[in-house]
Amino acid sequence: MNVQYVTVLGATGSIGVNTLDVISRHPDRYRVFALCAHTQIEKLFEQCRMHTPRYAVVRDAELAEDLSRRCRCAGLATEVLHGVDALVAVASAPEVDSVMAAIVGAAGLAPTLAAARAGKRILLANKEVLVMAGQLFMEAVRQHGAQLLPVDSEHNAIFQALPADFSRGLGPCGVRRVLLTASGGPFRNAPQSALAHVTPEEACAHPNWVMGRKISVDSASMMNKGLEVIEAHWLFSCPAEAIQVVVHPQSVIHSLVEYIDGSVLAQLGNPDMRTPIAYALAWPERIDAGVSQLDLFQIARLDFQPPDFTRFPCLRLAYDVLAAGGTAPAILNAANEIAVAAFLERRLPFLGIPRLIEATLATVSVSSANRLDDVLAADASARRVAEAMISEMLVT
Ligand code: NAD
Ligand code: MG
């Protein structure tokens, strides 16, 4: 068996750590080529000790010098680089087979796009890439023969439940619609009045998954499901009207595909990201992921509810921008990143998140998203507008 060289973008995050856990179970199959993080030097150093990558990448020269010194003292040959160009380089280097795209937010766009253009196998967790630049990214994947494997648990489930040749079109494959499950987050049953006062700590306490702070807030506002609707649209060429969100509080069914003959195929499993990570790493094979067996008797029941677009307006906004097309999803994504950061810093209340996104969408004009520059310009102006609205208290 050929050993696969893997670059992990976002190694110190929740997905990155789970990826390294799966990799460490299969030393005969995988070697780490590069580990990338933003600022968590200590954690990255420990990971370097454990996985001896050829490269490590951090945010800036100062952090790089710090990590480099630690590596030298520990007798590690890891070369430490810094900045976006270095992320791009280790995501597209000829020695690399697979790239785990697990940076959070728009910061992941450049290296993930570089991996696509270099024809890599991309394990995509960083859904914001597809929300911002879905058309461009999918074109790059096709043009350069990259292989795209969804890591987001819902999309991984759909990928597993679709026929292998789904890229010829869902209609021709007999697919009627996809059913995207959502846990409903920590505020699924909270009355509207209580949502006004929720804290970052409450928003980050997800009932079923342990995740990074940004995606945890997105889950609480249901923007995560909105981003995932857009992600599903691009991954599977699925029209918005054929994507049904289903609230399923147990997070055991990770999503479903409905066919025209009435069959509905689902993928089930414990809520543990190592399952979709292992699937994406080894596809089309299956490998041990260290995940405990699903105990149906213990679960006993599975519940389903329609989503509440009134209490969770972010979900509606995501369908709206998908219909609007062009740079509208990039504007929504940027405004959401600013809103979530402000909420986590207690500069914006929870209910201010959809208000800020809506106000930004009403201010920044939408253009076509055919070129990367269009997307980056929309992202930059949305961030500027959203930040200004927060500091001038135009949205509270
Ligand atoms: P996290 O916050 O735990 O980790 C983020 C990682 O990105 C860290 O390693 C951090 O160092 C790195 N990073 C942050 N900003 C960066 C920047 N500007 N430049 C370079 N690196 C940077 O996040 P996470 O929960 O692991 O999520 C990562 C991505 O995966 C997100 O897009 C999220 O939506 C997606 N995802 C996560 C889960 C999950 O269970 N955690 C599930 C599905 C999808
Ligand atoms: Mg998901």
Image (tube, grey):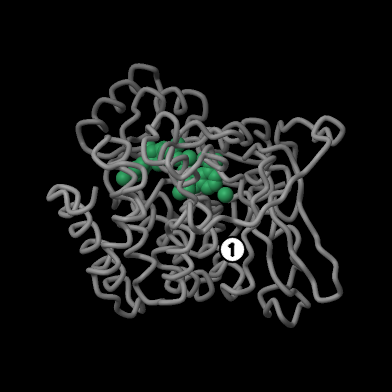
269 relative to 66, above or below: below
What residue do we see at 27% from left, 35% from top?
345
Q: Taking the image as drawn, is residue 35 in sight? A: no
The residue that mark 1 highlights is 147
Ligand 1 has an atom within 8 Å of the beta carbon of the residue at disc 1:
no
Q: Nearer the viewer, residue 352 or 124?
A: 352
Rendered location of residue 150, percent (x, y): 59, 56
Q: Residue at x 68, y 47 (%)?
A: 248
Residue pictured at 44% horizontal, 70% vertical: 320
Q: Is residue 23 visible?
A: yes
Front one among 354 and 59? 354
Residue name at image x 40 percent, y 35 percent: 198
Left or right: residue 322 compared with residue 307: left
Q: Is residue 306 left or right of residue 99?
A: right
Tag 1: amino acid: Gln
- In percent of width and height, residue 57 lies at 35, 39
Circle 1 packing at 10 Å, graded few (<14), some (14-19), many (20+), is some
Residue reaching furthest to the bottom:
172
Where residue 257 sits, quadrant-wise, is: bottom right
